[in-house]
Amino acid sequence: MMSKKIKLESHMGIAFSTIGGQKYLFPGWIPVEDHISFDDVEVINPYRNVKVEEYKITGSRGNKYTVTNRNGNFSCDCPAGKFRGACKHSTQVQKDLGLVE
Ligand SMILES: [Zn+2]
């Protein structure tokens, strides 16, 4: 049986919740039938065309980290980068790219 897919724009994934006997699809509070599952939803990521560049960088203790550039937003997977959002690795990459002094 062919079923029509629900198209939903989300860059954070989707979720279902049943409130007051009605099943809703999030984000958007879209009322759906009970049988609708993740397989019935086509998630469209509005940022899918965002250019993503990854830079491998070796930290001072020899740990290897990945700095990711998403349209100019730099992030790093090291502990400091995860908790503070900025770290010396992402700064280093931006320096190497000539983006900052
Ligand atoms: Zn880092």
Image (cartoon, rainbow, N blue to C red):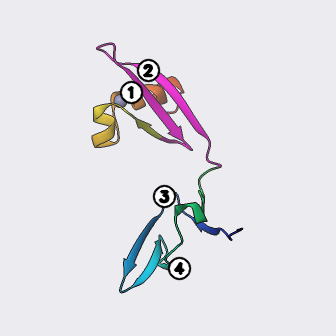
> Is residue 54 found inside the magenta-colored segment of the image?
yes
Q: Is residue 35 above or below residue 19?
A: above
What residue sits right under mark 4 in the picture? 33
Find numbered disc 2 in the image and state the secondary structure of the residue it sits on: strand
The mark nearer the N terminus, 4 or 1, is 4
- Mark 2, Cα crowd under 10 Å, few <14 / some 14-19 / many 20+, is some
Work out how far the residue at label 3 is from the one at label 2, CA to CA, in angstroms.
29 Å
Q: Is the CB of mark 1 within 8 Å of ligand 1?
A: yes
**Quarter containing ligand 1?**
top left
Choose top left, top right, bottom left or bottom right for residue 20: bottom left
Residue at the top extreme, as displayed: 62
In the image, is the residue at mark 2 within 8 Å of ligand 1 by its beta carbon? yes
Whether residue 101 is visible to the viewer of this picture, yes or no, is no
Residue that appears at 50% across and 23% down: 96
Left or right: 1, with 48 as reference point? right
User: Distance from label 4 to label 3 (Cα)?
Assistant: 19 Å
| CA neighbours of label 4 inside 10 A, class few (<14), some (14 to 19), many (20+) | few
- Secondary structure found at label 3: loop
Q: Extreme front residue here?
A: 1
> Residues under labels 2 and 1: Cα distance?
7 Å
Q: Residue furthest right?
A: 2
Q: Which residue is mark 3?
A: 13
From the image, state whether disc 3 or disc 2 is nearer to you.
3
Kind of residue sitting beneath label 4: Glu
Q: Nearer the viewer, mark 2 or mark 1?
A: 2
In the picture of the structure, the residue carrying the numbered disc 2 is 57
Circle 4/circle 1 CB separation < 8 Å: no
**Callout 1 secondary element:** helix
Q: Which residues are magenta?
A: 49-73
